[in-house]
Amino acid sequence: MKTINKLIALLILFISTTAFAQSKPFIYGIVLDESGQPIEGVYAYYDTSKGRVETTTNRNGVYKLDIPVIEKVTVWFSHLSFKGLYAEIANLSPGESFEFNFTFKPDTQVMPILVIDKETGRKQLEGITTISPDLIKNIPGANAGVENIVKLLGGNSNNELSTGYNVRGGNFDENLVYVNDIEIYRPFLVRSGQQEGLSFTNTAMVKNVDFSAGGFQSKYGDKLSSVLDITYRTPERFGAALEASFLGGSLTVEGVSKNKKWGAIVGARYRDNSLLVNSQETESNFRPTFTDIQSLVTFNPNEKWELSFLGNISQNKYQYQPLSRQTNFGTIDDPIALQILYDGQEKDEYQTYFGAFTAKHKISDTFSLKLIGSVYHTQEQEHYDILAQYALGDVDTNIGSDTFGDIQFARAVGSQLTHARNDLDALIANAEVKGYHTLGKSQIEWGAKYTREDIRDRLVEWEVIDSAGFSIRPPVVDIRNDQPYNPFTGDLVPYNNIRSTNFVTINRVSGYAQWSHKTNWGDSEVFLNAGARVHQWQVDVPDGSGKSQIVVSPRAQFAIKPNWEMDMLFRLSGGVYQQPPFYRELRDSTGTVRPNVKAQKSIHIVAANEYSFKLWDRPFKLVSEAYYKKLDDVNTYTLENVRIRYRADNAATAYAYGVDVRMNGEFVLGTESWVSLGYMKTEENLNNRGYIARPTDQRLKVAILFQDYVPNIPNLKAYLNLTYNTGLPGGSPSYADPYDYQSRLKDYRRVDAGFSYVFVNVGDKKITPPKASWLKPFKELSLGLEIFNMFDNQNSITNTWVRDVYTKSQYGVPNYLTSRVFSLKLLARI
């Protein structure tokens, strides 16, 4: 009878509040004790600049509390006899309600933080995957961070030293990255992952991560492949976090003012990749170091205004002095080795400065405006002079021989001298305005953005190849050589010689408008979205040959959640995705800027299904996505590690299609694990010569993130990050026809493992609160061991091409990545 009375009271409350059709959203529910009895007098409240909004539960334990529209508030629930808890309520629309029932525990138990965010359900309908910061923090990897999660969500990254990734056949330049709605840029001159030790995103500052591998909405920018949308958290109290390992460390401090209007979070990071790069085949004096300082300052003068500043200063120093290298390859029957002795060094440095100011004004409960201004400045230098003297030949396979493993017969002996004095200075400024309108169950969003890119670039690179006393000429030079019948009188020129100085200014104006609507068709929930982007740009070069170009990109989404016994969601999305060229896409392989390169165009279709279910009485989710991309005006490129060099001629068409299947859930009770399986094929047709594999054509991918703990010792945890990818195309040497080089690298196999003992973690229900007094100040404290490339697999990222002077053959010698490495890791948070 008591249960019936409680339900009747709750039903009457709900009907009455609905009948009055109040414009403000609200939360409501019943508060019970452990025996299931209602608790009267539970105090529920939140504070605003105008004062406190409060309520209490009645004798049936029922409460109702009005919530501001599309705004985050922290609602506290307290009672004299129980330990209090609080819930973060966010993104409720006008007239919307949310039922929140809970049971109060005795005072001896620490209550967890609860987050109620209607935004999460909307993102699921839109095809956005949300990742918790705790999951990202626990993934072991040589370059652990936000980008490390992408391999589980439709992306690939075969270089553990790089934060670059490709998604569904795209390259590193085709991914959008946002932090707090601000677009983030990567350095220009980076050639290898060894040169970029830190991504922009500081994991310790992250609140949540959203990712879409395709079919995203018009509000996101003009790129072909994916969106990584990161939100930094706004501090609510003082706190500090420290992370330290053999690869470096970070320190993050946050706090708020007494009146709660000001908040700041500052993070400093340092990374030294010496431990990893010194495990490679090349013996060297090598110490790449990377540092950055990042801050987010927020100011909320009243409930109408939200102001913030995001700043970042970073410096990458890459000092490299190679000594020697031996790479064994070939087959068991025909083993071959490449031995190299080096002389010289490389000194690279990248300094970036970034600042962004945002102001959000809530004009009414249904209309908000947001202003964003940002400046990105990068100064980059790439200087090297390296002489490599090499011998390529057959290996002595006689185990008893004194020269076992060394070259017995040299097929090629020669030297290679490479030189570069590359300098770049780029300044990118953005000004943007966004509008948000709520009209019942519909939302309208629009935005306009102006961007000015000012680039000053000097490119000086040359390469001389000398084989057995003969300087090899570039194969594209059309000069007759009929030695020994007639003496050769041509100039002595380098095998490769690039010299250019470019002063380029690009002005861009872009905008978007989109409509979203959530409704019901019968018993089914339906989500609709439609919108379009427009982008106009002009490349200004000294000769005035740049012309104005404009593209329009319509996009749409449809999702339906039937009222079935099975929790299923179906989604169809796609449209036109066009990528106007950035500076790197305008510069061809000779260093010449071609100002009228057109935007690459992709017609993208994604069909998806999400199935939420319970297995072993635990929650699981199975996500399946099939996609197809038709690409036109493709700007083909060559790939050297992570450096991309474009042809800048829009001379190809391409396609990509595939399937991604992902399941995540509690394979082990109380922990979340992920399993991802993908198949993808992408090919390009250059000048109608037929389709060949693109540089990112990686057919099969398997990725697993597994978390576990010892049942009798829940403080002892284990994390496994397993990746298997079939081999990428091996590329082609300079000036070669890519149609003649269609070999593939070996399959990529890697397992990273982490083991940690957690002394304190207040958010983990399985871990007993600490009894030792010295542990009381900590909210989290752990010490762990990380093993990178646990099984010591030899993975390669590219080939080094070596010429045999006798047969004039080119040998692709694999550039192997890091071997097995051990590291300790300390994590503390107060």
Image (spheres, rainbow, N blue to C red):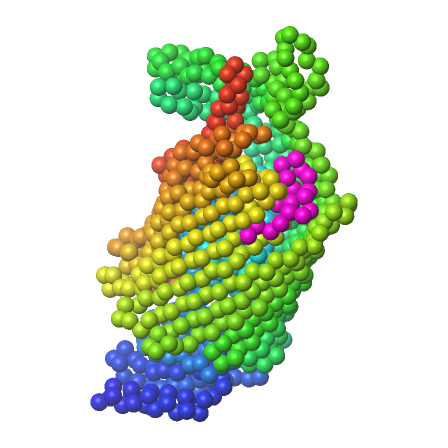
| 187 to the left or right of 761 | right
- Is 581 situated above or below 460? below
Q: Which residues are magenta?
A: 583-601
Locate residue 763, reporting x and y percent.
Answer: 39, 63
**Residue 22 appears left or right of 754:** right
591 is within the stretch colored magenta: yes
Q: Locate residue 40, reporting x and y percent.
A: 35, 87
Residue occupying image coordinates x 60% and y 72%: 435
Q: Residue furthest front?
A: 688
Q: Main secondary structure of the magenta part?
A: loop
Residue farthest to the right, as pictured: 543
Residue 8 position in % (x across, y down): 29, 90
Is residue 285 located in the magenta-colored stretch of the structure?
Answer: no
**655 horizontally vs 671: left or right:** right
* Camera-nearest residue between 790 and 589: 589
Residue 104, how many percent across, how many down?
33, 77
Q: Residue furthest top?
A: 485
Residue drawn at point x = 35 percent, y = 57 percent: 624
In the rendered view, tell whether residue 178 sits above or below residue 327. Answer: below
Q: Which image quadrant: the N terminus?
A: bottom left
Comparing 667 with 287, the one in front is 667
Identified at 33% across, 88% down, the residue is: 11
Residue 25 in sight here: yes
Taking depth in this image into account, of 763 and 812 the one nearest to the observer is: 812
Identify whether 786 is placed above or below 48.
above
Question: Do we see residue 166 in this rendering?
Answer: no
